[in-house]
Amino acid sequence: MNRFILTNARIVTPTQDFTGSLVIEDGIIADIQPDSSYAEGIDLHGQWLVPGCIDIHSDYLEKELHPRPSADFPMPFAFHFMDQRAAACGLTTLFSAISFSDNQMVNRSYESALERAHALDTLQDTGMIRHFIHARLDPNAERVVDYLDAMKAIPSLRLVVINESIPGQRQFRLADLIVKRAKSQQISIEESERMLRAQIAERSRVDKRAEIQTALAEVLPLGSHDDTTETHVAEAKQFGATLSEMPTTLAAAQKAKELGLWVCMGAPNYVRGGSHCGNLSCHEAMAEGLVDMLCSDYHFPTMLASVIRMMQEGVSPSQAVNYITKNPAEFLGMQQTGVIAVGKQADLVAFWEDQQVAKVSRVWVDGKLKFQTDPSGINEAFGKISSADSLPQEH
């Protein structure tokens, strides 16, 4: 039996937090002891000990593969550094967004999406953390239906989100797009508007939501991205969605909750104090009780940073942590992780806070130490740590 103890930790469960100890046996949490200390345990010196973050939406893979439009890196190289960055930020389960669409300007095609998905399948066992795929599907493209069967055969595909491609209807307002295109293409405002309205008309003629629902709804959770109007949300519900991902208006978020959809917002939105593109503020949505979970979206560090900021603003540690652990686990049906409780997987993160920075010291996945910082950094925060603190994984 592989057994070890984590002691003198600030443990956060779904309903309370306390200083105490955890006993881990064969990758499972075997016991939780509040107000206890073990001389033989790994002394965490009062660090926070929380479940590993479960990130249901990250755009990071594409950034590692294509850090610049004309700069490409191979999948194993990109995966390795994405995996390490995620672990260092306290993530233990990561859903990488892969766009199934045709847009060569941003290195996207259906063929390349399938290639990336299968490559991630082959690489995930080499990673420090768990990796799954979040497929982004364009319902306004004829070709999407040709790839639905192939998508169902991807073992790591666990979530599908509809990303409508009709310009000016969701995240970016039409008036802003008209000005942006006029500037980028050095054409008149009138010509820019004419081109965009023609594009809107063309893409609006195609809607493959029903085919996507028929093919995937019974085997995978479906979501809708950037819902802006109540009609968007009602349409998503009609075609099998159980998730409204990053609604852009308060009305859309309210409608999502009214219809029983889960609502996910971006952790960067919360940490920054607002949306980077002027849409719904996560703070505003949370104040109305409309948010179930947070995702990293485009920035891993904000997952734990959002927890720290919430606690600084009076949110209980349990409620703050649940947004990035328990709630996404429940949405995804991942019953064995997401909480610190007896019988659950030991997916754990130890960190201390320095202002608004979560400094991760250790990460365990299934009770196995996957990430550890230079002990000198911990020494500076907590004083000298004895050699007994090296993790006895193989007892």
Image (cartoon, helix red, strand yellow):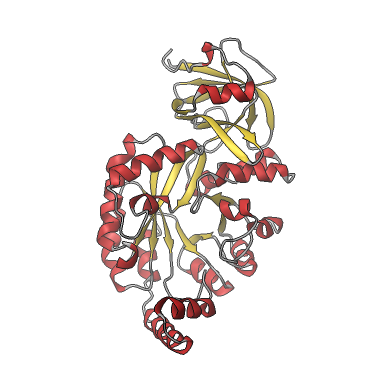
Residue lying at the far right of the rendered structure:
314
Toward the viewer: 197 or 35?
197
Count up the numbered dots: 0
Determine if residue 143 is in view: yes
Is the residue 16 above or below the residue 54 in the image?
Answer: above
In percent of the image, x 35 and y 39: which residue is there?
80
In percent of the image, x 55 and y 42: which residue is there?
325
Decide if residue 135 is on the left or right side of residue 177: left
Toward the viewer: 379 or 350?
379
Decide if residue 272 is on the left or right side of residue 148: right
Residue 61 spot, x, y in % from top left: 38, 50
Decide if residue 318 is on the left or right side of residue 90: right
Determine if residue 103 is in view: no
Is the residue 362 above or below the residue 23 in the image?
Answer: below
Residue 392 spot, x, y in % from top left: 46, 15
Q: Quadrant of the C terminus?
A: top left
Residue 177 spot, x, y in % from top left: 49, 76
Toward the viewer: 144 or 71?
71
Residue lying at the far front of the rendered structure:
186
Is the residue 390 above or below the residue 258 in the image?
Answer: above
Q: Quadrant of the N terminus?
A: top left
In percent of the image, x 59 and y 61: which residue is there?
275
Residue 207 spot, x, y in % from top left: 38, 75
Decide if residue 89 is on the left or right side of residue 149: right
